[in-house]
Image (cartoon, rainbow, N blue to C red):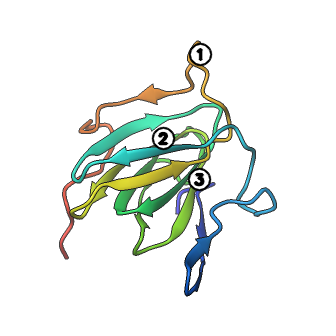
Amino acid sequence: MIEGVAVKQLARHADQRGYLMELLRSDDPIFSKFGQCYVSMNYPGVVRAWHWHEKQDDFFVVVRGMIRVGLYDQREGSATQGEVNNFYLGENNTILVKIPVGVVHGYKTIGMEPSLLINFPSEAYDPNEPDEYRLPWNTDQIPHDWETQFT
């Protein structure tokens, strides 16, 4: 796994009313800092990639549908520089993924329904100095294929 990436298994506590699932707590070992929280609705097949941050960690959780998150370690001097990871997040795999500063990331909604991704970035978005750096979703600089993988 890419250095600094962490995964938290989420647990649903269900009863006759439904379920409760904690996403992120300030006392979690995976937690760094709270900046803001937002939700992103994504249509099936849509790729949102690639970008990275120089100041913030991202904490991705999917509460509806499924996504495939792609990560690429472009950080100079990292023990895992050049490594690619993929994670499947959503109703069928209830995990939270921490994406550390400098790791390039993106995601694609998979399946037949929209996804709802919740992110808890460690810094608040500053429109005057956005901490977002981008590459096209299909760049040759990242050895990643967004097509569905059949094995």
Spatial separation of the CA atoms under disc 2 and disc 3: 11 Å
Q: Residue 18's x, y, as percent?
A: 53, 78
Residue 128 is situated, as x and y percent measured from the top left of the image, at 58, 12
As drawn, which residue projects farthest toward the bottom? 16
Q: Is mark 1 on a helix, strand or loop?
A: loop
Instruction: State which mark lies toward you, 1 or 2.
Output: 1
Among numbered discs 2 and 3, the one appearing first in the sequence = 2
In this rendering, the count of numbered labels is 3
Q: What type is the residue that disc 3 sits on?
A: Ala
Horizontally, residue 118 falls left or right of residue 66, namely right
Q: Do the residues labelled 1 and 3 touch (CB within 8 Å)?
A: no
Q: In this view, does 33 lie to the left or right of 96?
A: right
Q: Distance between the residues labelled 1 and 2?
A: 22 Å
> If the image is split into quadrants, where does the C terminus sit?
bottom left
* Nearer to the camera, 78 or 115: 115
Residue at image coords 61%, 21%: 126
Q: Mark 2 points at which residue?
A: 74
Tell me what residue is drawn at x 23 percent, y 53 percent: 44
The residue at the point 35 percent across, 56 percent down is 115
Q: Can residue 56 be seen in this view?
A: yes
Mark 3: secondary structure: loop
Circle 3 crowding by C-alpha within 10 Å: few under 14, some 14–19, many from 20: few
| Image coords of residue 107 (percent x, y) | 36, 50
The image quadrant of residue 26 is bottom right
Which residue carries the number 1 mark?
129
The disc, 1 or 2, on the residue closer to the chain's N-terminal end is: 2
Mark drawn on residue 79? 3
